[in-house]
Image (cartoon, rainbow, N blue to C red):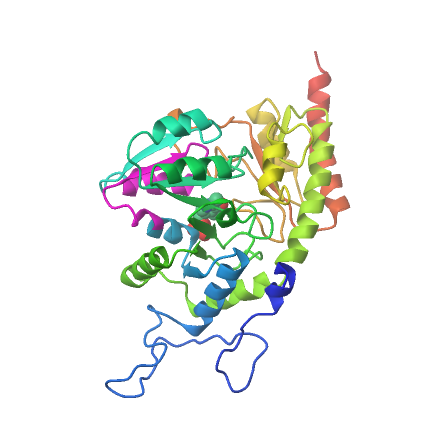
Amino acid sequence: MRPETALVRHGTHPGDPHRPLSTPIYQTALFEQPSASTFGAYDYTRSGNPTRAALERQLARLEGAEFASAFASGMAALTALTRLVPRGRIVAGSDLYGGTFRLLTSLAEPSGIDVEFVDTTDLAAVERALARPTGLVLLETPTNPLLEIVDLRSITALARARGALVAVDNSLLSPLLQRPLELGADLVVHSATKFLCGHGDATAGAVVTRDRELARRIAFVQNAEGNGLAPFEAWLVLRGLKTLHLRLREQQRTARRIARRLATAPGILRVHYPGLRGHRNRELHESQASGPGSVLSFETGCVASSERLVDALRQFSIAVSFGGVHSSVSLPCRMSHASIPGARRTLPEDLVRLSVGVEHPDDLLEDLANALAPLAQEQRVP
Ligand SMILES: *Cc1c(COP(=O)(O)O)cnc(C)c1O
């Protein structure tokens, strides 16, 4: 079965005599047991719930894995990952989601985990960081919001040789475009709030793996910390997943058009998008992913111009997050990455990030052209 088919054809109703085509929402905290000494498949929703289990099976299958644990958010999933290396060492990319940076510096480090941030696009730097015993390497590719590409095959080989686990945050592309486990990663983490849910109406996360022992440890954390995904949210993500391929195809097609348009627009200094011919790591990206996705960023060369542009857009909501059906725009330094202190932030202050939704492409292109017009005029003034 191809992934597009698997998105709609999956075990929606194991054991249900009514054979529902949509997985029911098992809105219950408790499950009655057959007797005091025999137990059913479920007893308590914190430990397991059929709706969440259906989502977990589906997420595992999409990533080409056997096991998945669904969490209340992407951050809860990332927190569970840090539990794999108590008092250990994590090597993480330096261009990382702001919330992940905050988790690692404000919670993981004070709890005794040694965290080193390295430029993961630089293999020599990764190799130097791995010279010290490391428990976990945490990667994002493309990075967000600069859309830099990290060489997954090379880094997983380096990490394996030194006994470190590799986890890849695959939120920006989804398993339809990139399957890190097939490239050697041990774990994949998702903010399912983004593409997997896709409608901006649920917060969710997941950890996916092929390794039974790692899966057991992650599921243990999910139960012990009580941050598993609730049944209704699991159902929303299951529903969103059914159209992931359609949404992604359309969003990516429009994102390509927008990126190309911006690349030649007056007033735009630089466009970051791995689907552009000029992207410095486009070939590497194409060797490990099947598409550039629908998130892109660009620089105007001037913070005030970027702010005016963002305020002038009408079809792009000013909002953090990405991957949903609604197009959105943000200034990462002021919004999603504001939790990274200035000194450690390597992002250009004028960077604008776009997440392209499913609106008609011409509406989005016209909106951008209108918002860009004053910038082009400013540049003409000597
Ligand atoms: C949004 C995001 C997260 C956090 O996920 P939540 O669902 O918001 O908790 C983690 N990693 C990346 C790359 C993200 O974009």
Front in this rendered view, residue 246 or 354: 246
From the top left corner, tell me how far across and down residue 89 is, in percent. Answer: 29, 38
From the top left corner, tell me how far across and down residue 284 is, in percent. Answer: 59, 34
Q: Which quarter of the rendering shows the N terminus? A: bottom right
Front in this rendered view, residue 175 or 298: 175
| Residue 136 appearing in the image | yes
Q: Which quarter of the rendering shows the C terminus? A: top right
Image point 52% across, 55% down: which residue?
A: 63
Residue furthest top as drawn: 382
Horizontal side of residue 224 vs 337, given as left or right:
left
Magenta-drawn segment: 81-108
Image point 68% across, 42% down: which residue?
A: 255
Horizontal side of residue 63 vs 242, given as left or right:
left
Asked which quadrant contains residue 108, the reply is top left
| Residue 96 appearing in the image | no
In the rendered image, residue 82 lying in the magenta stretch gets the answer yes
